[in-house]
Amino acid sequence: MFVLLNGSFGIGKTTTARLVACQMPNAAVSDPEHIGYVLRRLPAWMPGLGHQPAEYQDMDL
């Protein structure tokens, strides 16, 4: 099962995710910003990248 939390900055998504994960055995909390950190540092010459956008969310998948 996946539980996705989405919303504005500072409304408690991370806190809610941690509280839910505490109630579910073997649950894990994943923050997509960690993936974005890596993606933003990929060189523009990577196949399929074309250019380096300012936001990783704007990258073509």
Image (cartoon, rainbow, N blue to C red):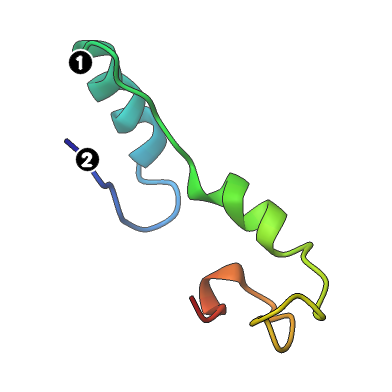
- Amino acid carrying label 2: it is Phe
Left or right placement of residue 45 versus residue 21 in this view: right
Question: In this view of the protein, which residue sits in the foreground, 46 or 4?
Answer: 46
Q: Is 13 drawn above or below residue 24 in the view shown?
A: below
Q: Secondary structure at mark 2?
A: loop
Residue for badge 2: 2
Q: Secondary structure at mark 1?
A: loop
Q: Is residue 17 above or below residue 51?
A: above
Q: Residue 30, how many percent across, how many down? A: 44, 36
Q: Quadrant of residue 42?
A: bottom right
Q: Is residue 22 above or below residue 33?
A: above
- Circle 1: is it few (<14), some (14-19), or many (20+) Cα within 10 Å? few
**x and y percentages locating residue 48 in the rendered image:** 64, 82
Give the image location of residue 16, x and y in percent.
Answer: 29, 31
Image quarter (top left, top right, bottom left or bottom right) of the N terminus: top left
What's the residue at 70%, 53% (across, down)? 38
Cα separation, mark 2 vs mark 1, equals: 12 Å
**Percent position of residue 34, x then y:** 61, 45
Q: Write down the quadrant of residue 46 in the picture.
A: bottom right
- Residue at 61% x, 57% y: name it: 36
Residue bearing the label numbered 1: 24
Q: Which mark is residue 36?
A: none
